[in-house]
Image: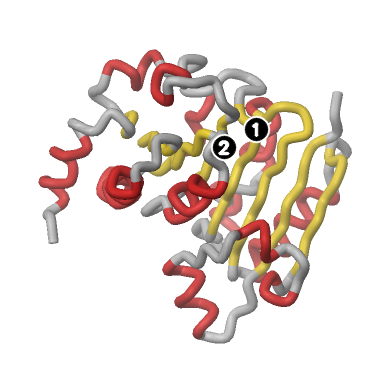
């Protein structure tokens, strides 16, 4: 197993990883076509970890560019190497905290956002760190194109119910679709059989997998 230091060294030479120290890290905003060599729609996976959804969805949507976002470079290394080995030219990774997304994307530049098994931040004092907290949802609204979906997949009942309640209290949500039991719903085809390591772990413990997607009212 490669050490973290070795992974970081390899990341520095991978054009598909945008991270501090690289020229594109400061200039990629509005210039993602230079990374992918096309102007196809951009889909994000936030807090992507090893990029299981980024690399899992990409083969099914060759005309979409997928960007996994995470703050951990050693995690991104895994996803970048899966993409390289599979020849996925529509995959890239961005190393940054989620709250700084506006430094890398223009308004209405993103077509879809996936949030897959994020840290639920269960303690009340950490509510503002939940990726479906109001300030994050406001951020996504600025970045998304009209009609773009935000999709949440989680095992955590608290986060699922919190997100649903938070969205129902807003006056700018056009549509919310949700299920507390994804595996026994009509939404399984949207996931192409992708099962993350966290998903497998929690499902085997008896947790039901929850799924929620929503979009904002079109201006």
Q: Is residue 40 visible?
A: yes
Q: What is the x, y in percent for residue 34?
A: 41, 17
Question: What residue is shown at x 49% (from left), y 21% (from top)?
Answer: 38
Q: Residues within 10 Å of mark 2 (few under 14, many from 20)?
A: many
The quarter of the image holding the N terminus is bottom left
Task: Answer with mark 2 or mark 1, whichever residue precedes in sequence.
Answer: 2
Quadrant in which residue 111 is drawn:
top right
Q: Which residue is mark 2?
A: 43
**Image coordinates for residue 8, horizontal then vertical, percent:** 18, 41
Question: Position of 7 compared to 78: left or right?
Answer: left
Secondary structure beneath label 1: strand
Query: Considering depth in this image, is 147 or 103 the residue closer to the camera?
Result: 147
Residue at left 44%, top 55%?
52
The answer to whether marks 2 and 1 mark residues whose Cβ atoms lie closer than 8 Å is yes
Q: Quadrant of residue 27?
A: top left
Against 41, is 136 above or below?
A: below
Quickly name the residue at label 1.
111
Separation of residues labelled 2 and 1 (CA atoms): 6 Å
Q: Residue at x 76, y 51 (%)?
A: 166
């Amino acid at each position: 197993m490669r050490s973290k230091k070795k992974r970081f060294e390899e990341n520095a030479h991978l054009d598909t990883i945008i991270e501090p120290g690289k020229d594109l890290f400061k200039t990629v905003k509005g210039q993602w076509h230079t990374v992918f060599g096309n102007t196809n729609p951009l889909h994000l996976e936030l807090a992507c970890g090893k990029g299981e959804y980024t690399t899992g969805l990409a083969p099914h949507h060759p005309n979409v560019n997928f960007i996994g976002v995470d703050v951990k470079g050693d995690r991104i290394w895994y996803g970048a190497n899966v993409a390289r080995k599979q020849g996925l030219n529509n995959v890239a990774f961005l190393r940054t905290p989620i709250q700084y997304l506006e430094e890398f994307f223009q308004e209405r530049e993103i077509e879809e956002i996936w949030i897959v098994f994020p840290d639920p931040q269960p303690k009340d004092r950490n509510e503002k760190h939940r990726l479906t907290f109001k300030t994050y949802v406001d951020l996504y609204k600025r970045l998304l194109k009209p009609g773009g979906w935000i999709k949440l997949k989680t095992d955590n009942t608290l986060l699922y119910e919190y997100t649903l309640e938070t969205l129902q209290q807003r006056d700018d949500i056009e549509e919310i679709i949700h299920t507390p039991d994804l595996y026994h719903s009509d939404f399984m085809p949207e996931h192409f059989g992708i099962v993350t390591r966290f998903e497998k772990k929690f499902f085997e413990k008896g947790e039901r997998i929850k799924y929620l997607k929503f979009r904002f009212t079109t201006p």
